[in-house]
Image: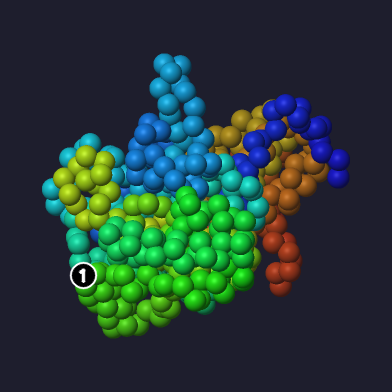
Amino acid sequence: MAPQTGELVSEVTAIRGMRDILPEEALRWQFLERTVAAVLAAYGYGEIRLPVVEKTALFKRSIGEITDIVEKEMYTFDDRNGDSMTLRPEGTAGCVRAAIQQGILSTPQRLWYMGPMFRYERPQKGRQRQFHQTGVEAFGVATPDMDAELILLCARLWRRLGLTDCVELQINSIGNARARKAYRDALVDYLQAHADALDADSQRRLHSNPLRILDSKSAETQAILDGGPTLEEFLDEEADTDFARLCELLNAAGVAYTVNQRLVRGLDYYNKTVFEWVTDKLGAQGTVCAGGRYDGLVQQLGGKSTPAVGFAMGMERLVLLLAEQGAVAEAATVDVYVVAVGADAEVMALVATERIREENPQLRIMQHMGGGSFKSQMKKADKSGARVALIWGENEVAAHAVTVKSLREGTVEGPAQSTVPLIELDSTLCALIAS
Ligand code: ATP
Ligand code: MG
């Protein structure tokens, strides 16, 4: 079919990697967002709403200067005053900033937020430049029971979404900064001897961010890593004890996991527990949820030392998974379509429809606008997906009545139609819709 509105002027098309979500897909988003909010409420988490733009320095200080995000993925610009601003690439930095600035960290805080994030990346399935995350952050608890709660919360969410069978939990401990530094040095020493055999990305990272080499997708690089030092050997006793306790809690709660010693996460602020929920249903973009402990970040941004742990879910990837699982039934947009032919009929229909909405707030009613013949309006009614049409024409106006027509095919008696006095409309409607 030729586009009815003609072709968009190329100068004003949407920005690459930034998508429109049309109403049908939005139903899936609403289901996901509702379920997420309900599960978070069940654990006593409170929603925090944060700005989409923050000072650039906030992200440099928290995420780290030598990370993919800060080095090459941020949307950074000077505002009219010449101050450097950045569209948030993730939510933790802003959440920590707000928690310190608003002075809400004197007692443990369980917070969540949902919204768009921006990263200049190569767009592909499950990877966009404007994407959405739900972030969850728990402040003020240093013990691994908090880490376990967050993981259990995720597991409950997957159950409610019907996704349990397509996601898998991976966990690891990356210890404290000292352990990581010692490990980093040992790893660089070892890899330098094999530098020529590493993939190009890993060669570059050898000097900038060597821990990221553990993430490499190259089989050759992974084989070289097999012979190298492991992070586990460098962990301090506290990290070991906490990790063992986390495993114990997950075992007791019946949550399955695998320990992935190469899981390090790409942001500087993590320590101790890190975890990811991954799926094999979305190709290369397999991580749907990722997080970990970041005990040093609050202090690093100027707050009083406060332990913290959190995670972020990629909403696009979860919506894709839901679609893959056929999780949300296609829902019609409306229950009732209102047809009115003639100026007087339009007035009566408008007034009656408003009254019906008043008395039946749960009913979804779409009234035809813009006039047209009975036939063309009925076509729209059929297309709308509504189960019932309410019809006003000359005869209905004269009799102060309305024709109620079932649009449902395949019922035993076939489509029903009856003309009823306006005052009887509500009960007729309810009976029809319930049938
Ligand atoms: P990846 O390795 O896929 O780039 P990441 O480590 O950069 O992920 P995080 O910063 O941990 O991702 O963000 C948490 C989650 O947000 C990811 O697991 C993913 O589900 C989602 N996510 C991250 N970047 C994007 C993006 N560009 N488009 C869509 N979802 C994204
Ligand atoms: Mg990334």
Q: In the displayed orientation, state which residue is furthest to the top.
A: 81
Q: Quadrant of residue 283?
A: bottom right
Quarter in which the N terminus is drawn: top right
Q: In the displayed orientation, state which residue is furthest to the right.
A: 2
Is residue 286 at least partly visible in the picture? no
Q: Quadrant of residue 125?
A: bottom right
Identified at 25% across, 44% down, the residue is 300
* Number of residues whose C-alpha sits closer than 10 Å to that of mark 1, classed few (under 14), some (14–19) or many (20 or more): few
Q: Going by the image, does 254 lie left or right of 353?
A: left
Q: Going by the image, does 75 lie left or right of 270?
A: right
x and y percentages locating residue 49 in the rendered image: 35, 41
x and y percentages locating residue 348 in the rendered image: 60, 34
Rendered image coloring scheme: rainbow
Q: In the displayed orientation, state which residue is furthest to the front.
A: 193
Identified at 66% across, 40% down, the residue is 16
- Relative depth, front residue between 45 and 28: 45
Disc 1 marks a residue whose amino acid type is Glu
- Relative depth, front residue between 30 and 125: 125
Identified at 43% across, 18% down, the residue is 82
Quarter in which the C terminus is drawn: bottom right
* Residue picked out by circle 1: 238
427 lies above or below 353: below
Identified at 80% across, 41% down, the residue is 376
Is residue 381 at least partly visible in the picture? yes
Disc 1 C-beta below 8 A from ligand 1: no
The mark total stands at 1
x and y percentages locating residue 133 in the rendered image: 46, 51
Q: Secondary structure at mark 1?
A: helix
Q: Going by the image, does 201 lie left or right of 183?
A: right
- Relative depth, front residue between 171 and 150: 171
